[in-house]
Amino acid sequence: MIPYREELQGVFREVFGDDAIVLRPEMTSADFDGWDSLQHVTLMIAIETRFNIRFATAEISRLKTEGSTVGTMLELLRAKLADR
Amino acid sequence: MSSRELLENHLAAARGTPALRAAAWSALSAALKADVEAGRFDEVREVVKSAALPTLDLAWVQALHRILAKLPRAERPLKVAVLGGFTTDYLVQGIDVFLFASGVDVQVYSPSYGTFRQEILDPESELYRFAPSIVYLATSRRDLGPFPSVGESPERVAEHVAAERDQWARLWQTLHDRLGCQVIQNNFDAPPWRLLANCEMSASAPGGYLTRLNLALVDGAPAYVTIHDVDGLSASAGRQAWGDERYFHVAKLPCAPASLVDYAHSVSSVIAALRGKARKCLVLDLDNTLWGGVVGDDGLGGIRLGQGDAVGEAFLAFQEYVLGLSRRGILLAVCSKNTDSVAREVFEKHSEMRLGLRDIACFVANWDDKATNVRAIAKTLNIGLDSLVFVDDNPAERSLVRKFAPLVAVPELPTDAAGYVAALEQHRYFQVTALTKEDLHRAEYYRAEAERKHIEESATDLGEFLRSLSMVAQVGPVSPLSLERTVQLINKSNQYNLTTRRYSNADLVALLGDPRWITRTVTLADKFGDNGLISVVIAKIEGDDLLVDTWLMSCRVLKRTVEHYVRNHLASLALERKLRRIRGDYIPTPKNALVEDHYQRLGFSCTGKDADGRTHWELALEGWSPGPSFIETGTART
């Protein structure tokens, strides 16, 4: 049981318009159809809205760079939500 | 549940918790997808019309955009080019969704951001191959030339303003010359920071400079340019909330993501208004909408309205707002479940009422269902259901009207009357792109019309009635003064319109310079008042013929023999030019059955009928003489 995985999965399904998406921590942007730089921004905006958090400028770009995974995203999410 | 039922949940959830909103949305979007799969396109259209609100999340607008992509669309969509100084992808998706909701199918061309000058200046660019009717310059303060240095004299700043304005005006002119298109130009939103703090409004401060530039843009814009008030959007959102710099740095978004949807809604409403899709009439419930309480139960003295009571003041403030709308050309109607005399008594006798019976173009108080009454109101005022906005505090009535009169716009209202104005405003139902004299006097026209109807009912002979009106018309070519109103009529007349051809401001200006084309506008006054500009004809001289391209009339002067008068005018015009015939077509649409026999009634003979229902007509002028007319020709107005 990974915290926030279900909720994040909901956001992914909405943004990519695909109800079959199942998130695994090791997934990267290459595992999703249409994850281009615009879709990345859409995703970041949707996550901020859904969890009522705010990414820093560097975090928004970092989550799209090579080596960044769904796991990175979940960790960052946990850290941000724990801060509150 | 059907998407129609889920729509009601979605609208109600807008005032609920984020989780409730999200759940209602996901149920609705799933139902819409199922509708698309099953080919229930009409249901999708109807539901999206009400669901597409400026308060949606960005991801939801994108979802709607994906759903709409699967619908069959108009064969000839409106072509819009969006030329951005910033990332316009989200605006473009929103424009598609919101214009669809307003009944306009669009095809959008949007090159990558920052290339707008090249696109405009290069005559070989993709923009000109696309040939849009509307070009939207989605630019921001970051696309401006250098700002004045702080401390420069107001005179130098004024020169700066003029030079910057002229730069943009040259781009508009180029677009206009090459495309004959309408241009929408963003004004420039001030930054959230204030370099000169309290003195930010001084001429050489960034905020002061931008304010002066924005005023210069709007004051000096030619008729083919509409300035889109982005600075107003920014102020409404709050400049700090609007200016989320992170997403500018990361993705060149023009504002905070949370404001993008409203931004797209705003520019869409401007485009829709340019296409004549702005709403015209506000239909108001009475009890708990215009005043607190139920007059039938609480009595004239028992309702809450007016000074001294906070709730009463809130209703008063709403009436003030509504009165303001009426004074700038929005028609008001009443639709109330009440005994007529009881409802009217409040207007006649309550000292705190801001609205009087004279402000109401159509007053309906009875016990019939409201969908039926709303239809009756549209019929009486001779306007389409898609021109109405229905305001009622009762959710059941709103739901009923949404269901049985789906073309009517029905905004949700909060339970607190102090929130009514904001609830109504957010939809931009009554968007304005230019203010015409007719707009300002519309309420008078309709009131005079009601008096005429009264006489018509009492007169026994139609000829006698028409003579008693003492009608005087003025007819002449389209002039700079009548241009706005003419374009407005051309783009919104659906019923009395023979060919339903739409022309922009720019198209018309081009025709005016061409000696082969003849344009005529007609104004009509009578003893009850001035109806303003009510008919437009555009015709072309071809050989011996006067070929009528466009002939339309405002339905407010139906059955007043204006069309006979116009025919006589066209005939004498043609005879002066030694022409032999007047020819014209009737092109049927879902809305113009009214003029199917227009030419026949005017003595034209039918020369053919096409498979699509289009009919061809002609009037031979040899030996033709005009019949008696009830309308006199007056001297030109100033």
Image: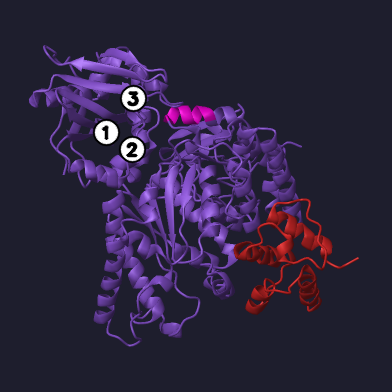
Chain colours: A red, B purple
Is label 1 in contact with label 3 (beta carbons under 8 Å)?
Answer: no
Q: Is residue B486 toward the left or the right of residue B103 in the image?
A: left
Q: Main secondary structure of the magenta part?
A: helix
Residue toward you, B193 or B561: B193
Give the SS element for disc 1: strand
Q: CA distance from mark 2 to mark 3?
A: 15 Å
Where is mark 3, residue-wise?
A: B558
Mark 1 against mark 3, which lies toward the viewer? 1
Tell me residue B534's x, y (percent): 29, 33
Residue marked by disc 1? B536
According to the image, label 2 marks what residue? B489
What separation in Å lies between label 1 and label 3 (alpha carbons)? 14 Å
Report which quarter residue B626 is drawn in.
top left
Instruction: Give the residues in magenta.
Output: B375-382
Give me the residue at 30% from left, 18% from top.
B616
Looking at the rendered structure, the secondary structure element under dot 2 is helix
Give the mark nearer the N terminus: 1 vs 2: 2
**Residue B70, relative to residue B87: is it above or below?**
above
Q: Nearer the viewer, residue B627 or B46?
A: B46
In the image: residue A73, left or right of residue B262: right
**Residue B492: horizontal and vertical position, in percent?**
39, 37
| Label 3 chain ID | B
Are there few (<14), some (14-19), or many (20+) residues within 10 Å of tag 1?
A: many
- Residue B378 falls within the magenta-colored stretch: yes
Residue B396 falls in which quadrant of the image? top right
Name the quadrant containing residue B33.
Answer: top right
The local crowd at label 2, few if under 14, some if 14 to 19, many if 20 or more residues have their Cα within 10 Å, is many
Mark 3 element type: loop
